[in-house]
Structures are given as C-alpha cells and as structure tokens.
Amino acid sequence: MAFPRSRRAVFLSLGSVLIVVLAVAAVVEITVRARLDARLESLTAEVPGVHASPADGLALWSLATGHVDIDIALGDAAVANALECRTGKDVEVATSAGGIAVQTDLDLRGRSVPARATFVADSRDGAWVLEAESVDVGGFALPPSAVGRLLGDRAPEWLSTGFRLPAMGGLTVTGVRLASGEAHLLVTAPLDPDGPSSARPLAALSCDPTSLQESR
C-alpha cells in the first residue's frame, strides 16, 4: 500500500534527522575517545611496565555519567617495583590467574634463606590489597598466620599480613583481575577538565619520591 505524499515526506524528514543525529554522535564519540586515549597515555607515560586502556563502553556514556572505567595493566616488573618500594628488598614476581607469587631472600641468623609467598589480589576501600595465601621459607611451607609466631621479627610482617597498596589520587580501584604476567586494576576515574586530584596518580606504583611509602 502506497503512503500519501505528506506521510512519505514526514518519513524522509525523520530519516534525514536521524542520519544527522547519528553522524554528529559518531563525530563526538571519536573526538571524546581520542581525548580519553590521550589522557590515558599521559597517565602511564612515566610509569614503566604500566598500560591503561578504557575498560569498556562508549566514550559518550562516560561523558554523560561523568566518570570513565579504566583497565590499568601492570606487568610483573611493575608489580615487583611497587612491592620493592614497600619492602626495601629485591623481589621477583610471577603473576598468574591463581595469584601473585613473590620471591625474595631473608636474613635468618646470618644466613640468606629463600622465601616465597603467594598472594591473592582484591580491591578494598578504593585501593588494592594483596593477601598472603601461602608461604614457603627455606623449603618449608608455613601458614601465613603462623609466620610471625614461628620466625619472630626475623621475618618481615608482609609475609603474613600481605600488602595494602596506597590509593591513587582520584582513581578508585573497583576490582582486580590477574592473568599470566599481568595484574589488571579495574579503576573508575572522574571525567572532568582538571583530571585526577593528583597530578601523578600512578606515582604510588613506583619509588617516586612524591609517592607515600609504607614502613618497611
């Protein structure tokens, strides 16, 4: 059945408007996405082994909600650097889907003894934490809760308590995902012209002198 000429004109007008709206939306999406990508690139520029990318969704949605979801990926070397800042010791890190294995040497009664601990990662109060799941000292498996009792002050506290990594100014950690060779922090950040509340929010992941260090 043929539509009256007036109705066809209305449909054509609506179609034209829709095309214009979609075209404008596409241009805005590309523009906002480019600005987000540039901001993320500058965010990790001075932190080796760390990469940031949009977690998912449209850039226009981030613009509408006022925040952006980011996936911050830390390679094993970057995780090791973050932990070395807080332990004062050289550590080796191997990340897998099952946890983060950390290996170092302890000084026990004048002897260098290898220690290895596996940590599970989680988010808590906007930061990320590593909780000790298993500990091996000198080839002997120890329950994390018993490390302090058995070894006293000869063993660092983090072997039993794990780590609470410092908050990153303006960035809220909402989740942690582990994969082979990488730890992924799922982060929410405000989307505003002034950027995060800290000029270098990822400095806490390094031994940068401007980042707060925990007691060792």
Image (cartoon, rainbow, N blue to C red):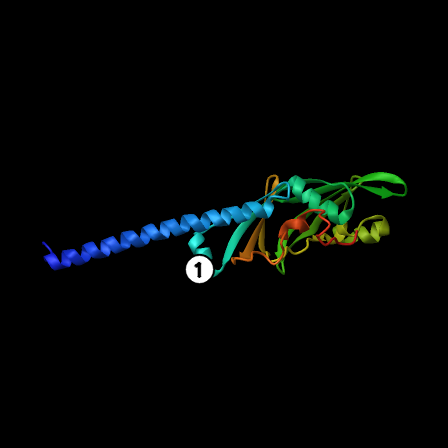
* Residue 184 visible in the current orientation: no
Q: Residue furthest right?
A: 110
| Residue beneath disc 1 | 64
* Residue 39 visible in the current orientation: yes
Say whether residue 72 is left or right of residue 159: left
- Disc 1 is placed on an element classified as helix
Residue occupying the point 62% across, 54% down: 199
User: Between 100 and 67, which is closer to the camera in this rendering?
Assistant: 67
Going by the numbered disc 1, the residue's amino acid type is Ala
Say whether residue 26 is left or right of residue 11: right
Residue occupying the point 53% across, 49% down: 39
User: Between 177 and 50, which is closer to the camera in this rendering?
Assistant: 50
Which corner quadrant holds the N terminus? Answer: bottom left
Place of residue 140 in the rendered image (x, y in percent of width and height, measured from the top left): 79, 42
Place of residue 41 in the rendered image (x, y in percent of width and height, measured from the top left): 55, 45
Place of residue 28 in the rendered image (x, y in percent of width and height, measured from the top left): 40, 52
User: Between 36 and 135, which is closer to the camera in this rendering?
Assistant: 36
Total labels: the figure holds 1
Residue occupying the point 9% across, 54% down: 2
Where residue 98 sits, quadrant-wise, is top right
Above or below, 112 against 121 in this view is above
Above or below, 124 against 79 in this view is below
Place of residue 175 in the rendered image (x, y in percent of width and height, measured from the top left): 58, 54
Say whether residue 120 is left or right of residue 115: left
Residue occupying the point 70% across, 43% down: 81
Count residues near mark 1 (Cα–Cα under 10 Å), then give few for <14, some for 14-19, many for 20+: few
User: Between 153 and 19, which is closer to the camera in this rendering?
Assistant: 19
Q: Residue furthest front?
A: 194
